[in-house]
Image: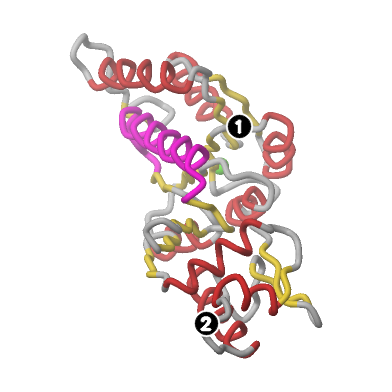
Amino acid sequence: MSKLGLKICWPGLFDVGFLFRFFLSILIFDAGVMAKILIVEDEKDMARGLKDILEFEGYEVATAETGKEGLQSVDKEKPDCIILDLMLPDLDGYEVCSRIRERSNAPVLMLTAKAQDHDKILGFKVGADDYLTKPFSVGELLARIMALLRRSAGYSHDAEVIRVGSSLVDVKHFIVRRGKQEFSLSHYEAEMFKLLYARANQPVSRDEILDKVWGTEKFPTNRTVDNFIVKLRKKIEEDYRNPRHILTIYGVGYKLSP
Ligand code: CA
């Protein structure tokens, strides 16, 4: 165990570090560009250790020591993945994560010394994609970062999986995933979501939703639209009574704000 609290797993020709570098080279070859990782961590030794390891693995690395600096770096650096320490001097890590989600779809790996389940669940609720408890092994950290980058690269190239806040909506397979929860979408819920997403950040009227989702063969009412919006919110929103993404535009209809 080093002073960073990281268990160093290499060197060694056939060790995990070698295998990760091998698979990383495939990932980099696939992506054609180097992934950029932002480390938000106030403990200088830990931040420096992580930076060295990630740069050694070929990643481009940016660092921030506070939550506010981290948020600025998300805007400025546009990282592909963010490693976020939970215990920061200025802002609560959960708040930082939730504010990252308002500005970036990059996967967030939370680091913390806490191991309780409720901390992990809260992390997922505010939009974290994965969670690692200190002390952790370098091999596990690298494996998780690679998995996150692979998944997010898949999502960005595949518009059938759409991030809305902390939820991932898979319209092809009619599934919504939020943290470890999974919900099924009905045909009409999926069609309604697709319509709202196609017009993201613009209001869509109830009449248009009725026309495009239900068509003229059925005889639903505006109330049907409202009922399906509630169903969709229960699956996609963290708190469906206080929606932050599927918004009511009074007198018009609804707007999706991913
Ligand atoms: Ca810290």
Question: Which of these two is toward me, 189 or 143?
Answer: 189
Q: Which mark is residue 79?
A: 1
Q: Which of marks 2 and 1 is nearer the N terminus?
A: 1
Residue in the image at 70% along x and 73% along y? 254
**Residue at x 34% of width, y 32% of height:** 143
Identify the residue position indicated by label 2 in the image. Answer: 217
Q: Where is residue 4 in the image (x, y as percent from the top left)?
A: 43, 29
| Principal secondary structure, stretch drawn in magenta | helix
Viewer-side residue, 185 vs 192: 192
Quick check: which quadrant has ligand 1? Answer: top right
Residue depicted at 55% across the width and 29% down the height: 37
Q: Is residue 173 above or below residue 156?
A: below
Pick the residue in front: 103 or 141.
Answer: 103
Front disc: 2 or 1: 2
Q: Does the residue labelled 1 lie within 8 Å of ligand 1?
A: no
Q: Give the range drawn in magenta.
A: 134-160
Q: Which residue is drawn at 61% across and 81% down?
A: 241
Residue kind at label 2, given as amino acid type: Glu
Q: Position of residue 248 (x, y in %)?
A: 72, 76
